[in-house]
Amino acid sequence: MDNSNHTKRTALIAFVVLSIAVVGYFTGLQSPVRPTGDQSAMAPATNLAGNRSDEQAVLPATAYTDMAEATRARTSWTTQLDGLKNNVDLLAEITIQPADKAAALLAREARRAFNGAPPTIPHPIDQLSDQACAACHADGSKTPSLRIPRMSHQFLTNCTQCHVEQNPTHMAAALFRESEFAGLPAPTAGARAYTGAPPIIPHSTWMRSNCMSCHGPTGLHGIQTTHPWRQNCQQCHAPSAFLDQTQLDREIDFLPPPPVVDESTAASPNGSQNE
Amino acid sequence: MIDAARVERREFIKASAMAAASAIACGTTLALPILGQEPGSTGINWEKAPCRFCGTGCHVQVGVQAGKVVAVAGDKNAEVNKGLLCVKGYHVGAALYGEDRLTQPLLRQGDRYRAISWDDAINIIADRIEAAPERFAFYGSGQWTIPEGYAAQKFMKGGLSNNHIDPNARLCMASAVTGFLATYGVDEPAGCYDDFDACDVLIMWGNNPAEMHPVLFSRVIDRRSRGDEVLLIDISTRRTRTTEACQHYLEMKPHGDLAIANGIAHLLLKNGTYDQSFVEQFCNFKAPDDENPNLHGKLISFDKYRQQLEPYTPEYVEELSGVPAEKIRLLGELFGNRNLKITSLWCMGMNQHTRGTAINTMVHGIHLLSGHFGTPGDAPTSLTGQPSACGTVREVGTLSHALPGGRVVTDAEHRRQAEHFWNLPEGRINPQPGYHTVAMWESFCTPTNAGGDIGTIWVQVTNPGQTLPNLNKLFNPKGNARAGLEDKFLIVSEVYPTATTQLADLILPSAMWVEKNGVVGNSERRTQQWFKMVEPPGEARDDCWQTIAVAHRLYERGLSGMKDRNGRFLFEVKDDSGTPVPIWDWNHYYDVNVDEHLFEEYRQFTRLKHKDLAPYSEYVKARGLRWPVVEQDGEWHETHFRFSEGFDPYVADGKGIQFYHSSTKDDRAQIWFHPWVPPAEVPDDEYPFMLTTGRVLEHWHTGSMTRRIPELSRAMPGAYLEIHAQDAADLDIRNGDKVVVESRRGSLELQAWIGGRGEPPQGTVFIPFFDETLLANVLTLDALDPFSKQPDYKKSAVRIRRA
């Protein structure tokens, strides 16, 4: 009897501890504690010169006393486990307003020096390991609080060769000198042959071969496809051989037109034969 | 001799035309499309150019709109990078647009500068030279384009009979040059980047290509994603991003490489796994001649070689290098296996080394001894850090002892040939080598009355105020009012203010990259061309024009050196109608393609060492061509693997391998023995840490361009000290703390970064040198390799304390 009670009590305690651990674990997973509400990894890196400070050598850790505050500061706090995986309804209707598109292009621009530049990294990184990048960006994901873009190209091992962080934790971010470089803006739309025709792809598909990385459900809303159930993008949307650098080294030409005799100037074939 | 070689080549091509393999062996020059105007209303014009930064030689497509570079894309037609770039390359266009570009000539007045006209600036330089031509020196760069370097070379050696011309590449790859010369009798790698696609094993000797040559490193590691098995081995003094991709990390003590190379050779001989047939046919053995030290040493017997290697057992090598004996055995087994393709890769780790020549020859040596040479994937490959360290410095020969095309000033026949090509009177070229880099700056920083006989230095396309070692001795005295250097005059052609312009007396604004025409040569013997695409800002002008304008001003003043044998101007260029074009007048500089004229003249020099270049027009069509580029039936063919039959047209039929520039004149390469010696400076009680310096991925060299690119500057804002966590704990240093680093030569205060980009072992610290306000080189040692005269930036003893 005593033994049985003891076992029950142990089981109950174990259950409570385990429950807290599970909830805590997923809460933690979803909600990285950040020192201030505004330092979201999603915020574009703007006006970094203003952050220059000799004192702020290292990103300060959140004090234990401030953690509740820091946690509350997150607006989309949730414990729903559903959000952790891509529960995407491919058939849901998607409407995109022009303003959404403008916002999406602006958000993209904040991370790129020009259209076609590799996007910069808005979050702290592991200085040495490429596996750390692949862990999230191989498949991409979207949770209520985070959007993790999927790689737009095939896996290339040396991630930090092209993508560099913009808010390094080891040193205060600072612009060394202002730049007057004005990068090529992203195209706002692909040309259409007529109203209702599928737009052509207005950018290079080189290093952007995975359309769904940007235009799929884990992409920014403003440039999402309205028809994610369609799987073969280039069936309807034509790429540009020019931008993809796939031109051949010759004049693209056609066979000559049929040589029609101009009756007004040519002598009559019969007449000449007779002569 | 040249003609004989031509005939041989012709026979070779006839013979090989029948062999199916020849199609693969000799790449044909393809006319690759230049994109041009983008269709539609965008108004963007795309043109090809090699990247401005490192020696890899990636090609980019440059998008120009309304006279400005607005975008950059990887060039898919480029064999080097196959459409991929690194983050520096993607942002290279922004390097032109830092807000503080230099736009007018500036003359020092006390501690300020006054804007002056170009005409005045040219006069000031001409005055300095005219007053004392022998006290003038030209300090150039591996970023000089081939025509720029060639013009400077001709101006100095052909015009002023003055050999005080040396480049920053002396600090970068001089030991690689002496290593090639001592081994093969001729400079530059036999292999090429194709080796990265074929190797089974890649050994990196003190090299961090994941950050410094990322496009090449990716070319290897991306093979794994496709299912290839490649064994990567990192022999290094510090963990880096490269280490993370390697199966084996061999952490060595500084100078451990000398012991490791000997350990490998020892095992190859002991186990009988060396390639006996290769060695007997193609190799001699050499050792340093201690009584008469010189680059070519003395021949020794195979038995003597074996005997000298006897002590280098894996256990003894472990003692010297710190690398476990089992890992030495692993290397020995790999080299002993003829079925594997092994490529060795190195850059500054082996070159910036007081035994740089020795270790370069030794790594070539183990490849030759084991027969891992001459087929795709089997190659000792030395990388360079600048876009034209090979093309300009090594091939044009902008070094104090060299003449174009592998010639030297000390050789009477070589001088005669150069005088012939330049149409100069006999005896114009001075047979005495000039000052090498360190000697040049030491002389400049020494008062005239104390023997400092260099009075004026003209610096182009480089930043010695940041990159010379031991800056407090070799550069900073110029800024010290009490140093007695009032009569010394520093001229700097630059695009941005730098640590060098800070002390300049005259600053000249230069055009850069696609603001001018250019030709460069990368690490795999590939010569690359581009055209001017945008105008330089303000009054910035081409470096090559600056040199020619000064030369012409001296010509106008009657300086006889500026005239050729017929009294014509040294740089006379005629247009199609045969009328001389006044290229010294900036308004007419682009009336003709000066680059093309200089290149065609220079091309004559390249045959002597069989480094034949094609006409300029061939490079316009291609994404670079690897020399020797030889003509057959109107087609120009490049060469992938040098000295190897079936690839190199200058190898005679049936030879297999032929080292046709052998220093022993017997078509053999030299396998060297060198003993292990300790570094020039080792940590002691007073200075207990070993400081090593280097680069980071985001910044190229002194950061004068990359730090002005916001994306790169944000990613890596400033310099730091990398230190091991235990050392930091012992010194009570926390991450981000300010620390003072002191050497016998200077001190520096900067932040500590523990567990950062790289992880040095206990006792070693690292500082990157890109930061112009935290100059790593106030700490470094100016000890030199005895043959290459290259300093060692990797081994300086320092002490550290909290600030």
Image (spheres, rainbow, N blue to C red):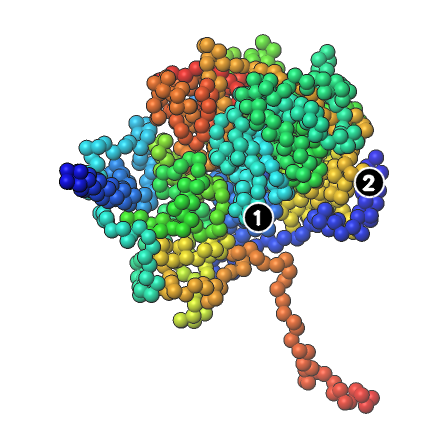
What residue do we see at 75% from left, 49% from top? Answer: B22
Residue A154, disc: none
Residue A134 location, quadrant: top left
Indicate the chain on which mark 2 is placed: B
**Cα–Cα gap, marks 2 and 1:** 35 Å
The three-letter amino acid code for the residue at tag 2 is: Gly
Q: Residues within 10 Å of mark 1 (few under 14, many from 20)?
A: some
Image location (x, y in percent) of residue B460: 57, 30
The three-letter amino acid code for the residue at tag 1 is: Lys
Label 2, on which residue?
B654
Image location (x, y in percent) of residue B162: 68, 23
Task: Work out whether B216 lies above or below B457.
Answer: below
Label 1, on which residue?
B82
Image location (x, y in percent) of residue B595: 65, 41
Q: Is residue A12 left or right of residue B771?
A: left
Q: Residues within 10 Å of mark 2 (few under 14, many from 20)?
A: few
Front position among marks 2 and 1? 2
Can I make out residue A47 in this image?
Answer: yes
